[in-house]
Amino acid sequence: MPTESPSATGSTPSPATVVPEPRAVASDGWFLAACCLGAATVLGVTLQLSNGTLREDALEGLSMTLALCGVGVLVSRVGRWDSLVEGGLTLLLAGGLVVELHQWCMNHPGFYLQLNGPWPYAPFYWGLAAQALVVGALLASSDRLRPWLVPLLLMVSFSVGVWLLRTSPSPFIDVFVFQAQGSEALLRGHNPYAMTFPNIYGHAHFYGEGIVQNGRLMFGFPYPPLSLYFSVLGKVLGGDPRYAQLVAITLAAGFMAYARGGRLAAGAAALLLLTPRALFVLEMAWTEPLLIGLLAATVFCACRYPRALPYVLGLLVAVKQYTVFILPLIPLLTPLRGRQLWDWLWRAGVTAVVVSLPLIALNPKAFLWSVAELQFHQPFRTDALSYLSWWVSKGHPQPPVWIAFAGTGVAIALALWRAPRTPAGFAASVAFVYCVFFALNKQAFTNYYYFVLGALCIAVAARTPAEEPASRV
């Protein structure tokens, strides 16, 4: 049907001027945003309590987070009076930011800091204070001033991250060894998936049976090629592979702030940057910041630049093994259906293959062992922040691994049934699905839930106002 109505003179537009009406997209409503804000704040505090390991209070926080995620997705149609509650969402966001800033003062920003001088933490607290001032100005400023404050927040946050990397140059964790030595191997022309790594811990508790032999870990680089490329860039440009994670999380905040614009989007970006364990994740060289950066870029493209969306989505699914659970949620991200959707998915798939195949083809067997098969040999961790670990801690036998996959399947089905077909609904569903997956898994620590927290913040930033029309893809 024509989208143009007759003019005031009563004339009807000619067929040449008629354009097809875009597919309608449901509003996210204020309730979904409120639940995501609450869940992100609770999860940030939860990770601060125990650094993502099993504790009773941390498990309670995880349960609250999971409940808020689930309610937000399943009851997302609640909330039609957006204009009446916009101020309330801003107040809720401000409260979450105050809680986060308080938590920063309750623990050290990292574990392996090499500090010296009479005021070793001065750069960190100056940076934290500067971020607090900029965030306050962001929430209180006009729309005209806000675009200038967002880059300032990103620069200050990035500078604090640089301070962290310089004061913690060699964290005692195997993930850092994997990225540093894997990058060096690729730069020397060797296959990182056919190498082995030193066992820095001196025991095999963190690895499966037979994985450690003569002090070496019998696997190569344990992440997909795109993750390795980012590590190489960080190594070459900054001298440390973790610079890739720092840039990724900074860009993620930028994508969030500009996805929809406005006070709420900028505040959600600040909520991600100021989450209490953000610098701890950066110090430990965990790769989830890369995942958050690409998820934010995907949602940004869905909101602002849909033509690039399939290619960015292809990068997203290629950066980490467990991104496979994102694939069933794609119908929430795009209004395309049928043949158009398949053409769109084909482009995303080709992108993922193109960035991955060159290193896979060098030694497919070594790649499959290091990236895929190894995951099934990882031991059950009794210190993981999951319900399975809690069950074992009570003296019960170890539950089967399939429980996590069954629970994830149910979460995906519920999200497809009830979540709004919007970028925010997609991001909130990603948070819900992965929160279920990690909460029922044999391994679940700070870095895993940091991705959930990032997805929650992205969902808030991408919230669709009720009056906004659907965008074309």
Image: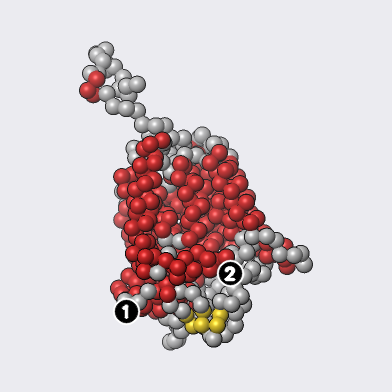
User: Residue at point 47% right, 39% down?
Assistant: 421
Q: Residue at x 29, y 17 (%)?
A: 6
Determine which of the numbered discs, if any, sits on residue 378 in the image: 2
- The foreground one among 18 and 330 is 330
Tag 1–tag 2 contact (CB < 8 Å): no
Measure the alpha-carbon separation of dots 1 and 2. 29 Å
Q: Position of residue 328 (x, y in %)?
A: 49, 46
Residue 60 visible somewhere in the drawing: yes
Q: Secondary structure at mark 2?
A: loop
Which of these two is toward me, 446 or 268?
A: 446
Residue 75 in picture, x, y percent from top left: 58, 40
Could you say which disc has been placed on residue 434 in the image? none
What amino acid does circle 1 point to?
Arg
Q: Secondary structure at mark 1?
A: loop
Q: Give the answer, above or below, for where 113 lies relative to 26.
A: below
Crowd band around label 2 with a 10 angstrom C-alpha radius: few (<14), some (14–19), many (20+): some
Query: At 45% across and 81% down in the image, what residue appears?
Result: 170
Residue 250 appears at what percent x and percent y? 38, 62
Quarter occupied by residue 106: bottom right
Q: Which is more N-terminal, label 2 or label 1? A: 1
Spot the residue most to the top: 10
Which residue position holds label 1? Answer: 188
Please, what is the three-letter code of the amino acid marked with disc 2? Gln
